[in-house]
Structures are given as C-alpha cells and as structure tokens.
Amino acid sequence: QQQVKQSPQSLIVQKGGISIINCAYENTAFDYFPWYQQFPGKGPALLIAIRPDVSEKKEGRFTISFNKSAKQFSLHIMDSQPGDSATYFCAATSQTGANNLFFGTGTRLTVIP
Amino acid sequence: DAGITQSPRHKVTETGTPVTLRCHQTENHRYMYWYRQDPGHGLRLIHYSYGVKDTDKGEVSDGYSVSRSKTEDFLLTLESATSSQTSVYFCAISPRRSEKLFFGSGTQLSVL
C-alpha cells in the first residue's frame, strides 16, 4: 500500500509558468514532509522540506503548501525554467515515531522553452 | 554527491547468482540506507543501518541482506538474484534518521 500518493505522474509546463505537484497521506503520525528532485542518471537530492507546524514554506522559486486537516501537501514551482525539468518525489515520515521515509511515485516535469 | 560512492555503477547478472553492491561514504554519517527505484513505485526502502553492525529491514527486504562492518561501508547482497530484482539501487546517508538524505548516483542492476 502506497503510504504517500502523488499526482500527476507527468507534467508539461511552459517556461515562466507555475508547476504544481500534489501529494496526500493517511498516517497522521507523519510530521516531516520533504521533496526530492532527481535528474536523469543521478540520485535524488533534497529540495525543500516542511513540518506541520507551518502551512507554507518558500525557498526561492519553490514553495511547499501544507494542509494538515486534508492531509495534503503540494510543491509549487514559480517561473518554471527548462533547468527545472526533472522528476520530483514527495515523501513523508514520522520523526517522533522513528519511522522510515516513504516516497511518492514521482512526477516527471518537463518545462518547454 | 556528498561524499558517497556506489559500486558498481552497472551490472548484468544471471538468475540465481549472488550479487553484492557496495556503498562507501566519507561523511561519517550514522545512518545508511539502500533503496530501489522502479517505475510506478518511486523509491522503496530495502534495509537501513543505524550504526556499525546495526541494521533493520525496510518495506521490501525479502531476498536481500545487508552488512555494515565499518561506519563508511554498507553492503547490499542479493543471495540468489531473480528477474524481479532488476532495478536501480540507491544508497543514501543521513546524520539523523529519515531526515536530509544524501543519495549516491545509483547502480543499474539487470538480472537476466
């Protein structure tokens, strides 16, 4: 059973547009929600992360929005660039419960010039 | 890649043969992990280690074993490889459990 459900599977966005990737979870014990970015032939790299005590976290053009009551969180990429073309994974874990890190199935983002 | 090296980068083997993948880190991080990546499944944890000789199972541990005899090395062994173990294997390290993982570049394993 997938602990974290991610959508869409693939996304095509024009340069300068906003890319939005959504994730949902069921386990209310989850308290740490990172996003990883992966380029072809490389391992995933931590992009940004959020804890449920805040509803939004922004780092440059990347923003995580978090809705605790709906058990959903999303990644917004503002002013998307061709260099953002990669696969993005959301993930979740319970640090207080010393849980494993569960990943979503990934979203392949293509930003066209 | 944050001082983490996986070897080999590519391997082709036959069903039933043993295979060992190696992960070496120079960051002195306590936690080390082995994940496999498959289309439609994302990344799934196979085993992890929280110290020398301290390991535990992940989501998909059947058919795999691990060993960590030194802080810097974490080995993944497929005792008898099967075609379902064809995958990309990633090693990761972190200073705290499940937080700020640094991944290696991966090993593409094909079991024929």
Image (spheres, rainbow, N blue to C red):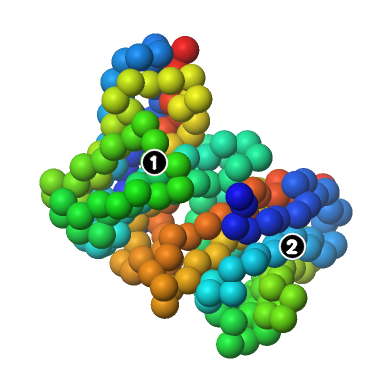
* Residue A22 marker: 2
The residue located at (30%, 52%) in the rendering is: B56
* Left or right: where B99 falls relative to B40: left
Above or below, A23 relative to B59: below
Q: Could you tell me the amino acid type at mark 2?
A: Asn
The residue located at (29%, 59%) in the rendering is: B31
Residue B73 image offset from top left, x and y in percent = 21, 45
State which chain disc 1 sits on.
B
Q: Quadrant of residue A73?
A: bottom right
* Left or right: where A5 falls relative to B1: right
Residue B108 image offset from top left, x and y in percent = 46, 29
The residue located at (75%, 54%) in the rendering is: A7
Q: Could you tell me the amino acid type at mark 1?
A: Ser
The residues tagged by marks 1 and 2 sit, at their Cα atoms, a distance apart of 28 Å
* Residue A104 marker: none
* Left or right: where B9 falls relative to B27: right
Residue in the foreground of this view, choosing between A19 and A10? A10
* Residue B61 marker: 1
Circle 2 — which element? Answer: strand
- Is residue B42 at all visible to an observer of this figure? yes
- Circle 2: is it few (<14), some (14-19), or many (20+) Cα within 10 Å? some
State which chain disc 2 sits on.
A
In the rendered image, residues at marks 1 and 2 fall on the same chain: no
Q: Quadrant of residue B99?
A: bottom left
